[in-house]
Image (cartoon, rainbow, N blue to C red):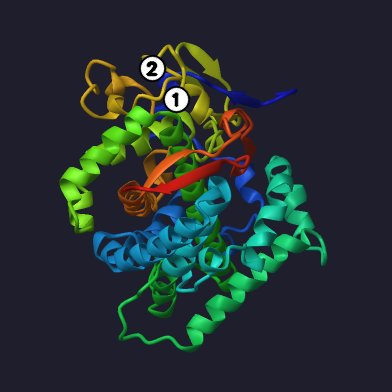
Amino acid sequence: MTGPRELAIVRKSAVSLIYGPESKCRKSTWYGQVDTDANKSSIHMTRDHDKHKRRRRAWDRGFAIKALNTYDPIIKAKVDEFIAQISKLETVDATTWSMYLSFDIMGKVGLGKDFYCVTEGVEHPAIQGVHSSMGLLGIMSHVPWLLNMMGKFPGAAASYQEFFAWCRSEIEAKKKVWNPEEYPQDIISWLIKAVIDREPSASPSDAALNDDSRVIIVAGSETTATTLASVLFYLAKHQVVQQKLKSQVDAVLGKQWDYEEVKKITFIDDIINETLRLKPALLTGGYRVTPLQGLTVDGTFIPGDTNVFVPVQAIQTDPRYWTEATAFVPERFGERRADMGTDDAPFFPFTLGAYQCPGKNLAFLSLRIALSRIMREFEVTFAPGETGEVFDQEAKDTFTTTLPPLMIRFTKRL
């Protein structure tokens, strides 16, 4: 086969064929950025299906209901700090401050380490290294062998290497004070426990465990931050939706905030899902390789060993599958689910099948807590001079999504 061998397929039937639990496709070489050896790579970059499945068991323990109950008060405390800060500032860049909150949450929940981004109002130096490299990573990730090679040279991708070193030192520090009798209080502790207990699900090497820690922070923080900022954009733009949400928050919670009660406010989930439909945290989706025997999508044969993907944002806003495809209508995930045909439309912001994001429930936990607290405290509007148009139209696909600034005014409710 000569010429290009990569296809973007915007067809509903392709979603399950490429990403579903029965898919014969495998991860592409895009996932070889850090190392081609699965024993030295994070679970996210592991292309071998069986090895990924085995390692996933340790991760799933870190995201189980019992573990999430441990994280709940940690997230609540971080959101309280966020509320206190924006109460004083009133007008903030929602993109930046959503990032501060999300990285603080994942620092504590992921590694048991506080970045103090919210309280200090600045990025932690390790996080600065991540963000300064995102643009390059977004481009270079499509040449994984070159990115892999650059990582082997001292000084290459120096800012990202600082983040690597920080994560590595934090894991070593946790190992030194490890108490096997203590119930794990963060996600990385579940992975360390699997290593120390020599479980089959353990990260196969120190390099793999170090890489796992980076996935926890970057994937967990960037995606939740993007979603929170985007929700705030839509709430500021659609005041009717915001007032509907406030009325439900007030009716259910009354004067006492309680997460068990928050879960009853299903309109929060509807808003989150509609935001993820229009502005998914990963715009492109995962790259896969067709099986050697090829793949047929809607009657079109695609040869084997072809790189394929379904652009998430494109198909989730495609009028062939979605009623009022580009409109913000959170009710399509609630009371209008049937008449708007939501269940028949392609929706996979956390991907599907064996590689579905293990942190989905943690993301919803964080977003529910943050949004319910914000709605209890503030009226959310665009700051003077802010229209939201640049934020809406100029996001960049840089592995995760890089958002433009969004100036939001948080006015205390009377």
User: Percent position (x, y) of residue 337?
Assistant: 24, 23
The secondary element bearing badge 1 is classed as helix
Judge from the rendering whether residue 226 lies leftward or rightward of residue 151; answer left or right: left
Asked if residue 272 shows in the view, the reply is yes
Q: Earlier in the sequence, mark 1 or mark 2?
A: 1
Q: Looking at numbered disc 1 in the image, what kind of residue is underneath it?
A: Gln
Tell me the residue at 52%/56% (across/down).
Answer: 89
Q: Looking at numbered disc 2 in the image, what kind of residue is underneath it?
A: Trp
How crowded pointer 1 is (Cα within 10 Å; few <14, some 14-19, many 20+) is rated as many
112 w.r.t. 327: above or below: below
Q: In this orientation, which residue lies closer to the viewer: 135 or 4?
A: 135
Looking at the image, how many numbered discs can be counted on the residues? 2
The secondary element bearing badge 2 is classed as loop
Tell me the residue at 77%/58% (across/down).
Answer: 157
User: Percent position (x, y) of residue 164?
Assistant: 65, 67
Residue 242's image quarter?
A: top left
| Residue designated by label 1 | 316
Tell me the residue at 64%/36% (across/down).
Answer: 396
Q: Do the numbered discs 1 and 2 sit on residues whose CB atoms are within 8 Å? A: yes
**Residue 145 got which mark?**
none
**Residues at marks 1 and 2, CA–CA distance in whole angstroms:** 7 Å
| Residue designated by label 2 | 322
